[in-house]
Amino acid sequence: MAELATIARPYAEALFKASSSDLRGAALWVDALNEVAKDPQLLQFADNPNATAAQVFDVITGVAQVALPEQAKNFLRTVIENGRLAVLPEIAAQFRVMKNASGGSSDAMVYSAFTIDGAALSDLTLTLEKRFNRKLNVAVQLQPDLIGGIRVVVGDEVLDSSVKARLEQMKVALTA
């Protein structure tokens, strides 16, 4: 949704500039706030006209999984007071992209039909880094409907070597 991206961009840019001295630390608390902000009950509470910004802030800081530094608290207050709590996941995503770009890396999501052990994941990471020509922060998510193989998403690039994708290609070829 372009509107969310447009709304989130100034917040993400300001956060990136303000936390340039400790991007890794900022990424930790931004991710923690992102997880909290995805909760539908919290968003419903925040949208309640009877709930004050201070009450919403107290609830979020109470359930956050990490201790929030003063910079995080100020950022959170700004987001809440401006009514942008629902945009926080997009702010976090844009912040992560900026952080990765400054470090010359990208996030890679590997979808696999089966679990990948540590050694295989290390080998896969090296292979993907060569293929995409950059440092990758690899995360794995199980997706049994792939049947076999993997599907890798790096930004807007997709590398799909799953059995499901190959079956779809065969279906298209046979029906064409």
Image: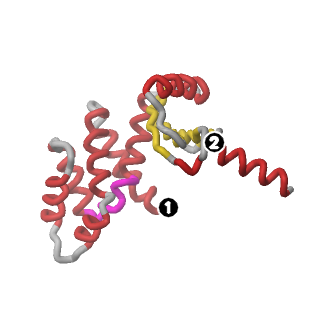
Q: Quadrant of residue 28?
A: top left
Q: Which residue is mark 2?
A: 162
Note whether 118 is above or below 74 in the view shown: above
- Residue 14, image x and y in percent? 32, 46
Which residue does the image show at 50% across and 26% down from the upper left? 120
Q: Quadrant of residue 175?
A: bottom right
Q: Amino acid at mark 2?
A: Ser
Note whether 172 is above or below 82 in the view shown: above
Q: Which mark is residue 1?
A: 1
Which residue does the image show at 78% across and 48% down from the upper left? 170
Which residue does the image show at 15% across and 69% down from the upper left? 52
Please state if 111 lies on the left or on the right of 38 as rendered: right
Magenta span of residues: 82-90
Gap in Å between the C-alphas at discs 1 and 2?
28 Å
Please state if 168 lies on the left or on the right of 22 as rendered: right
Q: Which mark is residue 154?
A: none
Q: Is residue 19 magenta?
A: no
Question: Quarter of the image containing the C terminus?
Answer: bottom right
Label 1 environment density (alpha carbons within 10 Å; few <14, some 14–19, many ≥20): few
Please state if 24 lies on the left or on the right of 49 as rendered: right
- Residue 33, image x and y in percent? 27, 50
Near-viewer residue (167 or 102): 167
Label 2 environment density (alpha carbons within 10 Å; few <14, some 14–19, many ≥20): some
